[in-house]
Each structure stands twice: as C-alpha cells, then as structure tokens.
Amino acid sequence: MIALLLAAALPTFHSGGDDLASTKLSAPGMRMRMNEASATRSPWVDSNGARYLRGLKSRALVSAGENRADLAAFEAYVFGADAAIAGSAKDKPAFDMALAFLQTLPKERQPALADITFFDDGSVEALENMNLLLRRNLQFRVVKQDERGAVRPKPGNPSEFAYEVRKKIGDDKRLLRVYGSEVVIARMEGDAKRRAVHLLNYGNRAVDGVRVRVAGTWKSVKVHAPDGALEAADIVHEGAVTEFSLARAGKYVLVVLTP
C-alpha cells in the first residue's frame, strides 16, 4: 500500500473573462463513442484527473459546461486541485450547492492510497496511460523521477496498458474495486484506522446500483451525498475485504469506513 498526501482545496466560481494566468481545462463529463469492435456505442469519460495528478503550473480554470459546474467542483476537490470553475449565472446555483456540501466534509484530508507508483515522464503517452488507469479505477500515485518498481509509460493502446497493470496488481490484491458502472471513477484515501472512498459519476444521470469492494475489514460504512440521504446496503465482510452497495450514485458520493 502506497500513501501520498493530498492538498486540501475548495474550488471557487469564476464568472468573468479568461484569466491568462490560469491553466484552461475542459468540462468533465461523458461522451458516447462508437466501439471499434462493434456497432454499439460505449461511454467515454472526460476527466481532468490525470492533469491534476500530473500537476499544473498555474491554477486551473475549468469550463463548467452545461450542467457540469457541480461535477467540476467535486472533481477538483477529490483530486486536491487549486481550481476556479468558469460558468455563467445559470451555472452558479449548482456550484453553490456543491460548495455548501463540500464545506460540511472534514477539513483535513487523509493520504491518498495507491496500489502502484506511476512514473510520469511528461509525455503524451504518460497522460493517456494515467487517463485509462483512472477509468479502470486502478489506484496509483505519480512520481516525476523514475523509482525502482515504478510502472513506466507505454506507447500504444492505453486500454491494453491499463489491463496489463491490472493483471500485474491482481484483482484480489487491489485496494478498491467498483462494479455496476463504466462512468464512475473512484479514488481512495486513508490510514490504518479510516478509509475515505470518493465516487465521481461522470454520466449524464445518476447511476442506480453501484457496488464497492474495499480491502480491509470495516464495520462502519457511512455515506455522505449532496442530494439527500443515502445509506450503504448489503454490507458483507469476507476475509479481509468489505463490500457494500449504493442504491444510487449522483455526481459525487463520499463513503467513510472505520473499524
């Protein structure tokens, strides 16, 4: 298990013109793309997570997009990014609701947990690799200098790369797994006494029926959701693993697990 301290940050709202001193990022969300192997359409998650993990030279200025101001705020918070969410007056209420909820959460963040270390050499391939690691909910930390045992960037198909990393870790040994959705990205923080699982839903609507598997035996599973009361169900402790279900996952859910 690898830990990395996260910066605690709350996003702000930006309703003026472009800030030339900021790093421009696009709105997070989901697009439907044609599947190369069939005639079906598969969801593609547009996330700024890899950019945040890589590190920005200036504060992020994130385009809110249509109905995305709250998701952009939640995403910046989860990744500990210094960000301003740019939007119009109609985007402000959703942002304000997201910020009000974030202010109710614990002020101090815990160390981010990871199964592997990823060496980011600054290449386009490395960014694509990180994007797919995130989409596959593989927990990783990023280093700028190569370390012994670190996973190195690989050109080619980033989806195949993520699958290779997943096999290397082994599903039974992963700290965190999510079932039931292709558009929910999960990140985990914690220590020996507590786990915090952040779930970001990049889809166009709430996801019904998400199941989460966390390494360790955690007797208390408390759910925090901005859109009303939500409780964990079907909690199972099997070996050194805790599994639970959420009937519904909106744009952001925080699950805190303790012994």
Image (cartoon, rainbow, N blue to C red):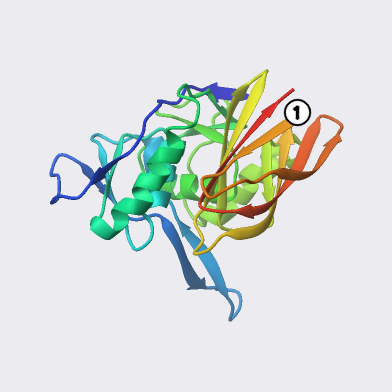
**Left or right of residue 249: residue 180:** right
Q: Which residue is mark 1?
A: 218
Side of 150 relative to 210 (left or right): left
The quarter of the picture where the C terminus appears is: top right
Secondary structure of the residue carrying tag 1 is loop
Horizontal side of 139 relative to 175 (left or right) equals left
The front one of 8 and 170 is 8
Q: Is residue 121 left or right of residue 92?
A: right
Q: Is residue 119 visible?
A: yes
User: Callout 1, which amino acid?
Assistant: Trp
Q: Is residue 115 above or below residue 136?
A: above
Q: Is residue 124 visible?
A: no
How crowded pointer 1 is (Cα within 10 Å; few <14, some 14-19, many 20+) is rated as many
Q: How many marks?
A: 1
User: Where 159 falls versus 252 (above or below)?
Assistant: below
Q: Position of residue 254 (x, y in %)?
A: 57, 39
Which residue is painted at 53% across and 23% down in the image? 111
| Residue 176 rendering spot, x and y as whole percentages | 67, 38
Which is more toward the observer, 257 or 162?
257
Q: Where residue 14 sits: x, y (%)?
A: 22, 46
Kindly identify the residue that appears in the image at 48 percent across and 44 percent down: 130
Residue 41: x and y in percent read: 55, 75
Q: Residue at x 47, y 50 (%)?
A: 155
Q: Quick one: which residue is furthest to the right in this view?
A: 239
Q: Return the residue found at the far front.
A: 228
- Quarter holding the N terminus is top right
Q: Residue furthest top?
A: 192
